[in-house]
Amino acid sequence: MPTMLFAFVLMPFDQEFDDVYRLGIKEVATSLGVVAERVDEQSFSETILERIYRQIETADFIIADMTGRNPNVFYEVGYAHAKKKPVILITKDANDIPFDLKHHRHLIYGDKITGLREKLSAEIAWIKDEINRARTIPISISSRPLWGVLEMTPYRHSAEVYFQFDLHNKTDIRSPDLEAFYLHTGPGWAFKQGAVECPNTKSDLKNYSIRHFIQPSVPRLSPGAWSQVKLIGTKQVWNKYRGGEPLESYKLTGVALIDIATSEGNYTEELLLDVTVDESPF
């Protein structure tokens, strides 16, 4: 019998949310074969913050109610994203989802728990399929922390950012043939793979501007195999003729999408861009 998935629920500790939790989240999750729990209904000996960290790390996915912009919930969602956990964001009011989180999947349920039940049921069913698929597919993608330097002239400043992706096959079957490796980004980016410039074209995906073609490092991955792709990305961050004051450092943020096309379908992974570049990174 397969193990039930575990959803850890993040929300304010307030009676106002009790019906949302019990009727709108927990009952729906249980009906779909998912164990959903809040930290305040668990028994533990560590501090509550340590327990929350542990449960986020243990959970298969997270359900987070962002209503009211509770700072603890926001912090915990950030930790979950850093741990690359799938997160379902829900809220009564769309304005409680900050601009930099709106690209993540989120549900607006207003004042009706019945609406939340319907929407969340479909979302949990989808995320279950994605998790089960991820556990059987022979390709997983991870990225190393980004770092970069600032190239400065009197006329322009350009950020040079170093990307490194690891491809793993953690299953006991050989991966399908790797046909292409794409990186979808916002505007202004160009990439090199070694000394070779990566071709690019307009992205066909919503929320992205450019699709960069990356040469796969291997044609396929055997069981237990690992491969690595290294890239150097450049983006102009200041130009004398476009106005604005030059800075000594620049913070680049956003989201990119890694998309590996294979003979049996595509494998994708979001990459959160958060790097500060200056003249010397040391």
Image: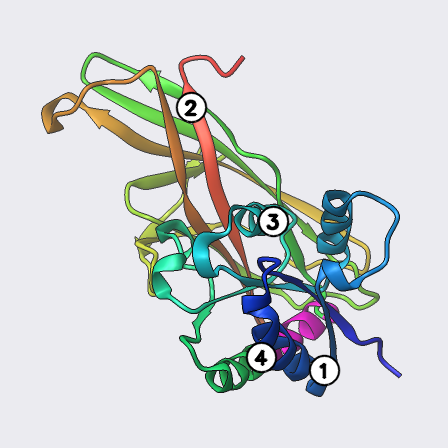
Amino acid tagged 4: Gly
Mark nearer the viewer, 2 or 3: 3
Looking at the rendering, the stretch of residues picked out in magenta corresponds to 124-136
Badges 1 and 3: C-beta atoms under 8 Å apart?
no
Q: Which residue is mark 3?
A: 76
Q: Could you tell which of marks 1 and 2 lies nearer the N-terminus?
A: 1
Mark 2 neighbour density, 10 Å: few (under 14) some (14–19) many (20 or more): many
Where on the picture, by quarter, is residue 111? bottom left
Residue closer to the observer: 129 or 202: 129
Q: Which residue is mark 1?
A: 30
Residue 120 visible in this rendered orientation of the protein = yes
Is 114 above or below relative to 6? Answer: below
Please tell me the numbered disc located at residue 13: none
Q: Is residue 26 magenta?
A: no
Q: Which residue is mark 2?
A: 277
Q: Quadrant of the C terminus?
A: top right
Q: Could you tell which of marks 1 and 3 lies nearer the N-terminus?
A: 1
Q: Could you tell which of marks 3 and 4 lies nearer the N-terminus?
A: 4
Q: Which residue is mark 4?
A: 24
Q: Secondary structure at mark 4?
A: helix
x 30%, y 15%: residue: 152
Q: Give the main secondary structure, helix, strand or loop, of the magenta stretch.
A: helix
Q: Quadrant of the N terminus?
A: bottom right
Q: Is residue 213 left or right of residue 153?
A: right
- Distance of mark 1 from mark 3, alpha carbons? 23 Å
Q: Is residue 125 magenta?
A: yes
